[in-house]
Image (tube, rainbow, N blue to C red):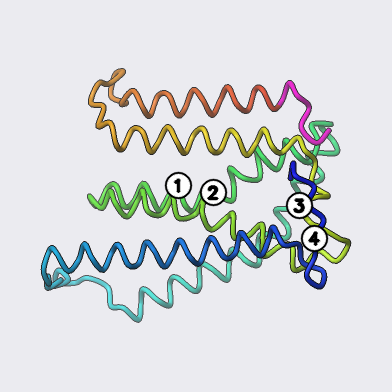
Amino acid sequence: ILGDVDLLIGWVSVESLVLMGLYFGGVWLVQQEGKLAAGSAGPTDVVPAPGFPSLRRGVIGFFSASVVLILVVPSLVDASTEIAIITGLGTGFVGTALLSFVTSLPELLAALMAVRLGAVELAVGNLFGSSVFNMLAVAVADFFYLHGSFLNDVSNDFALVGLLGLLLTLLAMLGNIARIERRVLFIELDAVAIIVGYLLGLYLLFLHGMGA
């Protein structure tokens, strides 16, 4: 976004192709790391509890929910654009604060359900993985943008959004590594720092007039 590199292969920018390469390379590295960890731990037999839903039911439910999301998203984007115009907040801020919140609700609910089931690694993997996949989505969107370099045409204001995302991700990583156990009421300090950082970041973007 800030570099203004105007190198295209066909109609797709080189930056988007680099993002795609990093994504698939990173997924491969994570897969290899998972194989090493599984090999050192030894084979484990997973036996579902009695009455546990079948794989077929799970796959059907997964794809049914995905189809519903695909059908609903266009209306959601149109409604967000109307809200941005009527309120004067700008499409950039509404996309960052409102649309991103709504489209991330499935990830939030999935993480909460995973936590309730005690699968904390599944919850964190879902949230970190969705952030990584969203970066791939930026590259994929470039294939549907036929008016030059996609990232070059994005406002430099979105560098602030990117920095906010990096800051919050780093706070989560540090919380995982540092193992801070101190709490404010029932919330750990690193979680408080992430929440406060998110709210202050949105306020900064509002003051900056994102996409107005």
Q: Name the residue under label 4.
A: 7
Q: What element carries label 1?
A: helix
Look at label 3 and name its amino acid: Leu
The Cα–Cα distance between marks 2 and 1, rounded to whole angstroms, is: 6 Å
The Cα–Cα distance between marks 3 and 1, rounded to whole angstroms, is: 28 Å
The outermost residue toward the right is 147
Q: What mark, if any, has residue 108 been given in the picture?
A: 1
The Cα–Cα distance between marks 2 and 4, rounded to whole angstroms, is: 32 Å
Q: Going by the image, does 148 lie left or right of 170?
A: right
Q: Which residue is rendered at x = 47% and y = 52% of the image?
A: 107
Look at label 1 and name its amino acid: Leu
Look at label 2 and name its amino acid: Ser
The outermost residue toward the bottom is 56
Q: What element carries label 4?
A: loop
Viewer-side residue, 197 vs 135: 135
Q: Mark 3 points at which residue?
A: 151
